Image: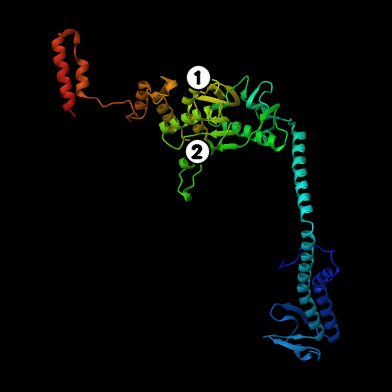
Amino acid sequence: MRDGGLIRDGIDPQLDQARALERDAGAWLIDYQTKLMEEHDLPSMKVGYNKVFGYYIELPAAQAARAPDIFTRKQTLKNAERYITPELKDFEDKVLGASGQAIDRERILFDKLCQQARSVLDELGSYAHTVGQLDVLCGFGDKAHHRGWVRPTITTDSAQENHLENSLEIIQGRHPVLDEMLEQRFVPNDCTLGTKDSPPHLALLTGPNMAGKSTYIRQCALLVVLAQAGSFVPAQSMTLAVTDRIFTRVGADDALHRGLSTFMVEMTETANILNNATASSLIILDEIGRGTSTLDGLSLAWAITEHLAQAHGSGPRTLFATHYHEITELEEHLENRVKNLNVAVKEWTSEDGVQEIAFLHSIRPGCADQSYGVHVARLAGVPTSVTTRAAEVLESLSVQQGDRIDAKSIASTNTKAVAKANKDSAGQMGLFTEFVNHPVVNELREVKLDDMTPMQAFDTLRTLQDRASTDS
């Protein structure tokens, strides 16, 4: 409002007149300067303006003596004199006043408009709401028409054919953004939670890094948002029980300004989910427990999965992407409450003996056997020496699955892999299973038990035990 320009031309004649005077000032000055030069034979004269002295007529010092009587001296410069005339002074008053008049006139017009709007606020609000709805629905319709989206079925009837209470079934669903960006390269996938053919409401999704786990779980949540907003969805078909809220735990952000570490933020968000989700909620979890030690994280992920699978009867619909393969045993431990899904991968060995994989981006039943993190590190450009050593360490730390149902897997080492790693790394010790030779152990290896009497064997064992407790 201070600078004007709010009201366009053609609305108010008085405003247009003031603006025209501002715009035409330059043309008037040119005509006036030409007129004075011709009338008084002053070829070097010029008419100008500055913010301090306003409009002026300037003559070089050599021509100042020829200044006509209508010129009144206004300012003396080193090599020139500046003058004003009554006609130029009148023009200055009009022009300088025109700018203020235009702004004042705009303010009057704006106040009148506000008064008019105040009298029809309810009607304007209804109009804006209607236009907003039409805009959204036209956008939904246009997208559905051009992208081949389908109408979802939303139900509160738990007795609907093939669906249990709080079910979600998406057949050949597609991510609404990536499907358009990738076109034919995007791989559609199904999602079935709480149907008669697939009763579990919680799915554990395992698979390699970069394979598409995060895309899949977010895709399912986006389709739920679209369906309940009134849009068609990018899928072959979709049946959805009404969802009260969507809870997400994704990413790895901290809030150090509030004194919260990355893991604390993760646990705070998880606590909010566990305390507020209902049977009608949809939960997507993209990794839980990755910000602490392996055993702590695994224990938390296991307990959280159990809680969600058994809470509120059948549990809220949950998609949990994780690299903790151990918790996939819950499919057997919590039958008909938890199911395993994995992202398909094609593996082969190249001519130079390097293991290669291709991500198929297809979600299938079952659990993955590994996460291919070393392979992804190699794709990212991590030096070969590092990825090679990492593969050796990974082999030495490979988990031997024991009593998996009780989650008591104990990491054991592959001594052959460690020995090879030690040899290749120029004497570097292994992480867990390489021991320094002890003279007692060496002497024990030389004992000939078959040539000893029981008493001799007992005395030898006692001697070795005493030495083992005293030798460094």
Q: Earlier in the sequence, mark 2 or mark 1?
A: 2
Kindly identify the amino acid type of the residue bearing the numbered disc 1. Glu
Answer left or right for 435 relative to 71: left
Q: Residue at x 57, y 37 (%)?
A: 247
Is there any visible trace of residue 12 in the rendered image? yes
- Residue corresponding to mark 1: 332
Residue 326 percent across, percent down from the top left: 46, 25
Q: What quarter of the picture does the C terminus occupy? A: top left
Counting other residues with Cα less than 10 Å from the Cα at mark 2, is it few (<14), some (14-19), or many (20 or more)?
Answer: few
Q: Who is closer to the viewer here, 145 or 265?
A: 265
Q: Comparing marks 2 and 1, which lies closer to the viewer?
A: 2
The image quarter containing residue 101 is bottom right
Residue 114 percent across, percent down from the top left: 77, 62
Residue 220 percent across, percent down from the top left: 63, 32
Answer left or right for 23 relative to 200: right
Q: Who is closer to the viewer here, 216 or 315?
A: 315
Answer left or right for 409 relative to 201: left
Q: What quarter of the picture does the N terminus occupy? A: bottom right
> Rounded to the nearest whole Å, what is the CA distance between mark 2 and mark 1?
26 Å
From this view, report whether residue 259 is shown above or below residue 43.
above
- Residue corresponding to mark 2: 271
Q: What element carries label 2?
A: helix
Residue 424 percent across, percent down from the top left: 37, 27
Q: Residue at x 70, y 32 (%)?
A: 233
Kindly identify the amino acid type of the residue bearing the numbered disc 2. Ala
The image quarter containing residue 240 is top right
